Amino acid sequence: MSMHPLDPLTPQEIGLVCSAVRKHLASDTDVKAFKFMSCYLLPPPKRAVLAFLGIPLAPGEKAEAPVLITRKAEVDLVDLVGGRNFNIILSLEQAGWKVDTFEQLPEGVVRSDPRVQELAKDVGIASEEIRVDGWSIGWDDRFSTSRRLQQGLLFARLGPHENLYAHPLDFTVVPRRTVSHHRIPETKLPTLDTEPLAHSGRERLPPPRKPFDFLPDLIEATDKNFKQRDGLKPLSVVQPDGVSFKLTGQQIEWQNWSFHVGFHHREGIVLSTITYNDGGMLRPIFYRLSLSEMVVPYGAPEYPHARKFAFDSGEYGMGIMANELSLGCDCLGQIHYLPGAHVKHDGTAQIIQNCICIHEEDSGVLWKHTDYRPGGRSQTVRRRRLVVSMVCTLANYEYIHNFMFYQDGSIEFEIRLTGILQVYVAADGEQPPNGTLVAPNVNAQYHQHIFCVRVDPMVDGIKNTLVQQDITPSPFPTGSKENFAGNAFIATDTKILTETGLDFAPFGTERRWRIVNEGKQHYSTGKDVGYSLNVKSSTVQLMAAPDGWVGKRAAFATKPLWVCRDVEGSKGSRLWPAGKYVPQTREAPEDSIGEWVKQGKRVENEDILAYLCIGTTHIPRPEDWPVMPVEHVNVSFKPQNFNHLIIVPGHAIWQGFDPNLRTKASEWAFESFGANQDSDRLEVFVKHIVRAAQIAAEDDKSLVVFSGGQTQPASTTTEGESYLRLAIKMDLFPGNLRATSENFALDSFQNLLFSVARFFEVTRRYPTKITVVGFEIKRARFEQLHRAAIRWPQSRFGYIGIDAAGDNTLAQQGELENGFIPFTEDSYGCHDFLLSKRTRRNYAARYPPYELTNPRLAALLGWCPQKQTELFHDVLPWPVLHD
């Protein structure tokens, strides 16, 4: 099996890459001691990947010719002696991994420290009971940014496995070489040579000692009245025939979806080249989806808590913090796992075996309707979803990442938050203004979780546009012609033309966004097809001031949505909204979203990126202690405006005015087969029209094309126009006429091809699905011959056959002799017998305009090969599948 170009580095590759770096360091640099910080795949250019996979860049185009893709890796390491940081790019050549570029980047100690031990002892905590959560220092101007520092948040563990977060200590440390700096909450920062305890003016606070455990055996040991909940019967998730998805390497196929699952040490799950098989047409949707950054700012202003705003992706890495999952707990049902691997400091691979979980879930009802009228029927369809998930532990918090695919073409990214609150010790009687006392002397501070989702769209191609929609009350007053009852509201679309950050909606406005392809329009709305970004319940405004520490470093969190141009360079695409190297920044660096959009490049109909910020503001409740029940944050992507062509080939011309007389022969111009047969045939013509209208009523993305030219000398109109007029007279399209006529077809092949061309004239796009409603005896002619002649895939072609009642033996014989066999010998009907039939039927000398209105179909429209069965082999404006 060949490797997908976006497959992450394998554990073996990580080892080989790091070995090549070691050799380079020894032979070409003065670096003596070092440790690896990261080692990961440097993705190849987007166009090269799409060409490799055969995905076109625009609808109706051929995929670009494949080019050689060189596998590359990127490494970051730290010089332990000189304090320097280096970034290395390597390429895989025939002889092995080779260093391409080597660039210098600008720029258990705590527990054993005597000062820390003494401070802990003063409040009754032994050195072996001290536990430390290491956080990036965030912002502290007293320290140089050239030295990487952490702040240690201290707790006590009073027994094996017990909840250490129930016992917060009253000081923090900043390890700097071998010196620990003790901090007590105070808004004014003491100098580094000041004794912090004296500066704070506070008495020492011993940690609360009451246990608040979450492990059942530990709770039972301290609470004799504890009893686990009972009464629940077993709930089994069983798939006796196995799973519905197919996993090939890291490529997944399920219910028309196809996508690649990757692993990144920083983002965790990365989904790429997401496509949907829309009735046989391969439709690209997203090139890449991932959680590219997040920030957790705490709302307590006193020192040192203002330093607590963790960038859990950029400072620690979601992939590095990923759990190894277990069946029946983290994932339920029939599970497939994928491993993850990242580099350890020594250059070997850390392998997480069951890192990514893939499974199916029942997700309630997809849709339901009950016809409430007497005798009405009811229909309910269950919703199945495919879930790709992982769990990350960031010290006290857990984040569950779920990418979910649905059968209606939508995608949801959900983050579930759980774990243990970050807490601090409170004095007896203290009422913290920026936190909740979730237990005696345990202060859980207010905070936010803001996640930045990177969306690299390719909705029907890589040229996309972001549209903002504002829903507002009508500007016209009650009583006016435009708003007589005072109930009107409107939706206003605004294309985003240049790179920018978009604002929250003002009060009284509901704001939505969608990503569209301006090259495809919906037949009814006339609007561009696209995917909506559904974040209404998950957008959250950053509570920190824009000019404060958090606002400067996490500028991405100040807007709900950003859009910029995708720019690929030697080190890949724009990935990180807060910058590539996040720890100890003082403001957003040059390689961050706030700086990118300052260029103001045009983003209409371009290869764009969207950075979507979602989150939650957490005001802790006592019920969130000691372990927080899951809270949900999500964004969903839903399709808009997909199309279906319904064709009704004409066989006669209705000349009447009263639809009640529609089965009388005197109302029609047609070739008579005898009085008895004529009556039956006329009823079938009407049934064809009615059935097409029924299909259209069930699919609001469909357009009916009644097809047929002016084939009768006794009439001045066409088959197609007369069928449409009869349908309107019969009120088959109440309130919404989703039908048109095609007025030039002279035989069944032209019914099909010309209807496709007419569909484009009306909608400015080609259909994704075709359904023909005609005589059952002509099924083989359409399914086997005409469909193949225009190279339309069978998987998205349907035929509904309705014949006259009674014996159709003679009709079947006539179809074989005059239709099926001639088209078997002359695929395009442009020679001898079939050509003479067309000429004979074209009484009014009507000639189609489709070569002008459909230039991309011109070659097919004019195709008449000397070898009469030779199929058209040039480019077509729809993907061609070989059935």
Image (cartoon, rainbow, N blue to C red):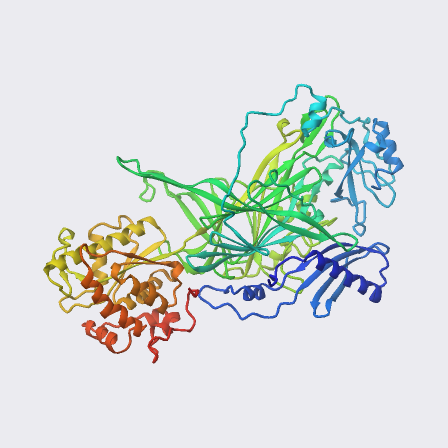
Image quadrant occupied by the C terminus: bottom left
Q: Residue furthest right?
A: 114
* Horizontal and vertical percent position of residue 545: 65, 42
The answer to whether any part of residue 267 appears in the image is: no
Q: Residue furthest bottom?
A: 866
Q: Residue at x 16, y 68 (%)?
A: 712
Q: Quadrant of residue 819?
A: bottom left
Q: Please state the total of marks drawn on the protein image.
A: 0
Q: Residue at x 58, y 66 (%)?
A: 48
Image quadrant occupied by the N terminus: bottom right
Choose between 611 and 870: the one closer to the eye: 870
User: In the visual, does 634 lie left or right of 870?
Assistant: right
20 w.r.t. 635: above or below: below
Q: Residue at x 41, y 57 (%)?
A: 279
476 w.r.t. 812: above or below: above
User: In the visual, does 233 lie left or right of 371?
Assistant: right
* Horizontal and vertical percent position of residue 181: 84, 39
Q: Residue furthest top?
A: 225
* Horizontal and vertical percent position of residue 669: 14, 63
147 w.r.t. 850: above or below: above
The answer to whether any part of residue 229 appears in the image is: yes
User: In the visual, does 137 lie left or right of 667?
Assistant: right
* Horizontal and vertical percent position of residue 226: 65, 21
